[in-house]
Image: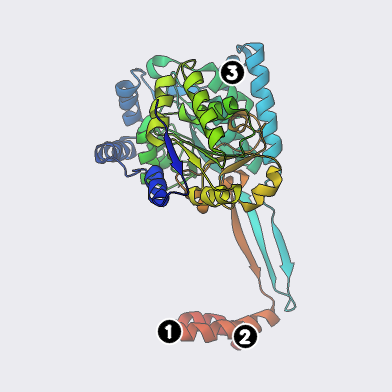
Amino acid sequence: MNIKRLNSANPGFKAQLDALLAFESAQDDAVDATVARILADVRARKDAALLDYTRQFDRLTVSSAAELALTPQQLQHSLDNLPPNQRTALEQAADRVRNYHEKQSLNSWQYTDADDTLLGQKVTPLDRVGLYVPGGKASYPSSVLMNAIPAKVAGVQELIMVVPTPNGERNDLVLAAAAISKVDRVFTIGGAQAVGALAYGTESIPQVDKIVGPGNAYVAAAKRRVFGIVGIDMVAGPSEILIICDGHTNPDWIAMDMFSQAEHDELAQAILLSPDAQFLDQVTESIQRLLAKLPRQNVIRASLENRGALIQVRSLDEACEIANTIAPEHLELSVEQPEHWVNAIRHAGAIFLGRNACEALGDYCAGPNHVLPTSRTARFSSPLGVYDFQKRSSLIQVSQQGAAKLGEIASTLAYGEGLQAHALSAEYRYKHR
């Protein structure tokens, strides 16, 4: 296979890097039109539309929406039926994710100033959140843990999960993860119609305040369209990994770390930065040798050939500068003293420090969330966390003394803006008592 080999010292490097990072994320018009029709139908016909689309897309015929709901006993049954090693791994991962996110909670606070005016912040959880989980042959129990656990830690009162079951095929790992995460209700629906049900509500499925979780192009398009009616986590692009290596890590490790992202899909991106040209040669050899052993080699090959690169840089300092330009979803600092180099990184979704911290551990069980900003959005956004399931309300309680002082300031500014009622509203508190 042929993976791009770039050199930052070349005059055309910036243009080459820009071309490598370019990704057409515009929504396909046909997908968007289909999603718009489905959402309008669900909004109008509610459960009846859900039943029709479930028959059409999941090839599952039921007579009522009640048959699409799974009971807590069914979820527990899936958990109880897991092989012991899978159950143990799932529970251990859940514990680590929960322990990490319990440290994230925002706190309410307040203070009283010299005028006896109380000011503060009240933090409250969202009432109800919808979690979309891919279903059928796909198995993403880790996605359930990463989305459901921080919501529960935040204090969300009700967590509703939707998961398609094509041809009635249920995935025990996914349902077991829902049981471990204490998801409140589960409905076996998927696609844009499931997003519409969560956003608008139906006779059987209540409207939520926010929708989180990954999905295909139709799910992503539906989340875009319902944003504003409900909140969403993000619209994620293809998965990404950027590795900075000093040339002293086992090249097989680096090759496999690149594969771990490339195997997601053909649009995933894996990039290696190193000042050591000989090491890049070694990684190239590892890629060629190890690829043939993997069942998803065709996907990996397409990803690496289309969007992957091995880039020789002048120094690790320059590598960090390039990393900040790329603002990757996952960044591995496979170097000596990674704690020194991490200070140079400003933009990354998750940073893995040292040679032993492979990105795959972050996907499943390290503890931090694996729902991360992609497509350079790490420049201004953050990993999913407890704070995404909480909101803040300002507290303002004004004393008589404060009303006079603040009222004069407010009325002056209000008159300046031409808003007389605002000014008078403030003045009444101290001029017309």
Q: Which structural element holds mark 3?
A: helix
Q: Which mark is residue 73?
A: 3
The mark nearer the N terminus, 1 or 2, is: 1
Image quadrant containing the N terminus = top left
Disc number lying in front (1 or 3): 1
User: Could you say which quadrant of the image residue 399 lies in?
Assistant: bottom right
405 left or right of 312 in image: right
Image quadrant containing the C terminus = bottom right
- Neighbor class of circle 3 (other Cα within 10 Å; few <14, some 14-19, many 20+) is few
Alpha carbon separation for disc pair 1 and 2: 20 Å
Disc number lying in front (3 or 2): 3
Q: Amino acid at mark 3?
A: Gln
- Which residue is pictured at 67% across the width and 40% down the height? 101
Q: Amino acid at mark 2?
A: Tyr
Vertical side of 74 occupied by 211: above or below: below
- Which residue is pictured at 32% across the width and 21% down the height? 55
Residue position marked by numbered label 1 in the rendering: 418
